[in-house]
Image (cartoon, rainbow, N blue to C red):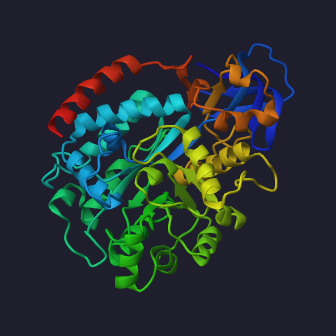
């Protein structure tokens, strides 16, 4: 195939916007070089605005098929905990074939929205009764196949899930298919790591402190040897979790984790919603990513992460769509900012010393944190042997929303000017996966999904 060259009137590079940018992509899908103030020559013209694709740092793919099915009141004080029972019932109906169909549909939606990498926090390991599939990796392979089918980059995070609470109680009947021993979990990791390539990264996920005993966590973290995989964990998502941790371990979840685990820049603390000022400073000092999922956190009534305090400590953030009530980086970032505005009754919260643009700050921070959490090279348009993957979004310069906008206004308009789709073309790993708003295989994938979704809904 050889190298390919693309030309953008304006491209957002690590140091900001540059004009007349020529990007060269090599056979591996990596960016070989980036030249600004360049001539177009024989390069393909992409249009006015080109920006890097966004990593999605937290996904439970199967939950996309139940979006909208948990919005009827089941209890006067519905919460995450009542929603979880609905989710368990739905999860019990998912098999490898249906998981692949759901994940592929979801990944098409992600690509069209501007996500080019997804971190799949995967705990549906076994059959509903808890017995392993003939191939213990069957459910993991379904996710890998869906990512390959659609062209999205995948950081697969097989999840260790062992107990039903901080007191070490056994898993409930509905949780049995999630459960693994340390030995079986490490064998699964070993099997999957043999498949790693430029678009597949295998990391570690500890479901939560309530689901992973301390000795198991220590053993798993010590197992990776010279490898440095991403490590993800749900932590401090609900008040009830904080209260239980205090009662059993005499410490708050984040406090306990920082004191008992080697938390560093490889880690992603998903949600971390209920944290103290000392915990905020502690997370920021480690370089760990705060994995924020604003639309899911709002849907479940979890609470608001203290964003401004964390950014003031130079904390690293990223975004995820989690339960996929929404599949849009624009909406995640918009509601991350809007939640802070509603809480503080002020505007324009997420800004930095380098930029007073909320949109640019949010996109930049989530891009950097998402790439770190995914364990990939920084999600940026840069060459110079950085081996940045060619993950590009071409925005629709025909849209009326962008008609009177320049680079200074681009990100603020992109994130805060309504719900028109502005991502026209998407390149992932050097390949065009979306052209003129359409994924190259979306009709076939959608038809397969319709059959699966109908069957699941009828049995739910």
- Which residue is outermost to the bottom? 250
- Which residue is outermost to the right? 37
- Which residue is outermost to the top? 42
Asked whether, in this view, residue 65 is left or right of residue 25, the answer is: left
Return the x and y of residue 352 as percentages of the image width and height.
77, 55
Return the x and y of residue 132 as percentages of the image width and height.
16, 52
Asked whether, in this view, residue 269 is left or right of residue 7, the answer is: left
Asked whether, in this view, residue 333 is left or right of residue 169, the answer is: right
Residue 224, picture quadrant: bottom left
Return the x and y of residue 442 as percentages of the image width and height.
41, 21
Looking at the image, which residue is at 60% across and 78% down? 278
Q: How many marks?
A: 0
Frontmost residue, 115 versus 406: 406
Q: Quadrant of the C terminus?
A: top left
Q: Quadrant of the N terminus?
A: top right
Q: Is residue 332 visible?
A: yes
Residue 38 to residue 203: above or below: above
Frontmost residue, 375 versus 79: 79
Looking at the image, which residue is at 18% across and 64% down? 172
Frontmost residue, 445 versus 420: 420
Q: Is residue 198 visible?
A: no
Return the x and y of residue 123 as percentages of the image width and height.
31, 53
Residue 299 to residue 401: above or below: below
Looking at the image, which residue is at 80% across and 14% down? 41
Residue 246 to residue 352: above or below: below
Looking at the image, which residue is at 49% across and 57% down? 230
Asked whether, in this view, residue 288 is left or right of residue 85, the answer is: right
């Amino acid at each position: 195939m050889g190298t390919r060259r693309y030309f953008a009137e304006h491209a957002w590079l690590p140091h900001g916007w540059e004009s007349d940018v020529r990007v060269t992509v090599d056979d591996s899908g990596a960016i070989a070089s980036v030249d600004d103030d360049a001539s177009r020559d024989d390069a393909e013209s992409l249009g006015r605005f080109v920006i890097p694709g966004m990593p999605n740092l937290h996904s439970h793919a199967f939950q996309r098929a139940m979006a909208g099915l948990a919005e009827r009141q089941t209890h006067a004080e519905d919460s995450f905990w009542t929603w979880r029972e609905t989710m368990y019932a739905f999860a019990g109906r998912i098999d490898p074939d249906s998981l692949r169909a759901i994940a592929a549909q979801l990944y098409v939606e992600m690509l069209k929205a501007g996500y080019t990498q997804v971190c799949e926090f995967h705990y549906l390991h076994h059959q509903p009764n808890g017995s392993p599939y003939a191939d213990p990796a069957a459910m993991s392979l379904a996710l890998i196949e869906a990512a390959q089918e659609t062209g999205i980059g995948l950081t697969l995070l097989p999840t260790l899930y062992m107990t039903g609470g901080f007191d070490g109680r056994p898993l409930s009947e509905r949780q049995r298919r999630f459960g693994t021993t340390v030995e079986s979990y490490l064998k699964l990791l070993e099997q999957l790591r043999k498949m790693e390539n430029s678009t597949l990264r295998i990391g570690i996920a500890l479901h939560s402190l309530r689901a992973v005993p301390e000795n198991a966590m220590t053993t798993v973290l010590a197992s990776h040897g010279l490898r440095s995989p991403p490590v993800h964990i749900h932590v401090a998502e609900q008040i009830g979790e904080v209260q239980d941790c205090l009662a059993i371990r005499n410490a708050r979840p984040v406090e306990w984790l920082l004191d008992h685990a080697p938390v560093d820049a490889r880690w992603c603390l998903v949600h971390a919603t209920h944290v103290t000022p000392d915990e905020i400073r502690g997370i920021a000092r480690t370089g760990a990513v705060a994995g924020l999922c604003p639309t899911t956190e709002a849907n479940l009534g979890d609470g608001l992460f203290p964003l401004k305090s964390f950014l003031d400590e130079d904390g690293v953030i990223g975004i995820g769509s989690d339960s996929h009530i929404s599949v849009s980086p624009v909406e995640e970032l918009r509601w991350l900012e809007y939640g802070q505005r509603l809480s503080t009754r002020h505007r324009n919260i997420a800004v930095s010393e380098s930029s007073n643009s909320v949109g640019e700050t949010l996109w930049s921070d989530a891009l950097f944190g998402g790439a770190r959490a995914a364990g990939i090279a920084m999600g940026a348009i840069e060459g110079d042997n950085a081996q940045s993957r060619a993950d590009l979004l071409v925005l629709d310069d025909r849209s009326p929303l962008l008609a009177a906008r320049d680079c200074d206004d681009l990100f603020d308009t992109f994130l805060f000017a309504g719900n028109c789709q502005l991502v026209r073309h998407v390149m992932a790993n050097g390949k065009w996966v979306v052209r003129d708003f359409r994924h190259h295989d979306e009709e076939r994938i959608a038809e397969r999904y319709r059959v699966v979704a109908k069957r699941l809904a009828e049995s739910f």
